[in-house]
Image (spheres, rainbow, N blue to C red):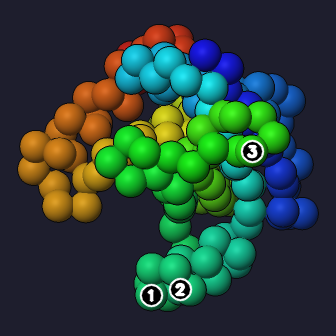
Amino acid sequence: MSVKVNISVKQKGIKLPTGARLLIRKACNATLGYEGFTKNAEVDVTIVDDEIIKEMNREYRKIDSSTDVLSFPLGVDGVYDKNPETDALMLGDIVISYEHAVAQADLYGHSLEREIAFLAVHSMLHLLGYDHENGGLEQTIMREKEEAILDLLGLAINKV
């Protein structure tokens, strides 16, 4: 399995810390590995500020506030379009608010590294079809998978 993670930064307020791009790539790869995904894949990740993610949240979800991460899956029921140039499955787009990540790391009392990895893993699970919007068992399953993947990355809650 080969995963191409295209990362672009569209915010100017804060410089990404060294290693953030590599961490995002590792989180995406770890999620696919954990889920037993064996095909070549592509994911686009964009780092933005709160203003940009608020505009996107309003446009796509009709929610007029900023958020930490948005996921735009391209597949339905495990069926994805292929990039005609690479033959890789196009899983979708992830948009992370760097400002939100910084604030949430502080709020939850863990490292920015863990928060960025969590947001990438969380969003990757959405791209693979997981959802937590209805709460209950779906939310519990998603949360358990997130923690297991973060543990694989050495970012378990008790290690930070």
Visible residue check, residue 26? no
Q: Nearer the viewer, mark 1 or mark 3?
A: 3
Q: Residues within 10 Å of mark 3 (few under 14, many from 20)?
A: few
State yes or no: discs 2 and 1 in contact (Cβ < 8 Å): yes
Question: Residue 62: horizontal and vertical position, in percent?
Answer: 45, 87
Q: Earlier in the sequence, mark 2 or mark 3?
A: 2
- For numbered disc 3, what is the local secondary structure? loop
Examine the image and state in which quarter residue 54 appears.
bottom right
- Marks 2 and 3, how far apart at CA: 32 Å
Q: At numbered mark 1, what does the secondary structure look like: helix, strand or loop?
A: loop
x 16%, y 55%: residue: 135
What residue would you read off at disc 1?
Answer: 62
Q: Percent from the top left, x then y, of residue 153?
A: 54, 15
Which sits in the foreground, 72 or 122? 72
To which quarter of the image does residue 36 belong? top left
Between 20 and 134, the one nearer to me in the picture? 134
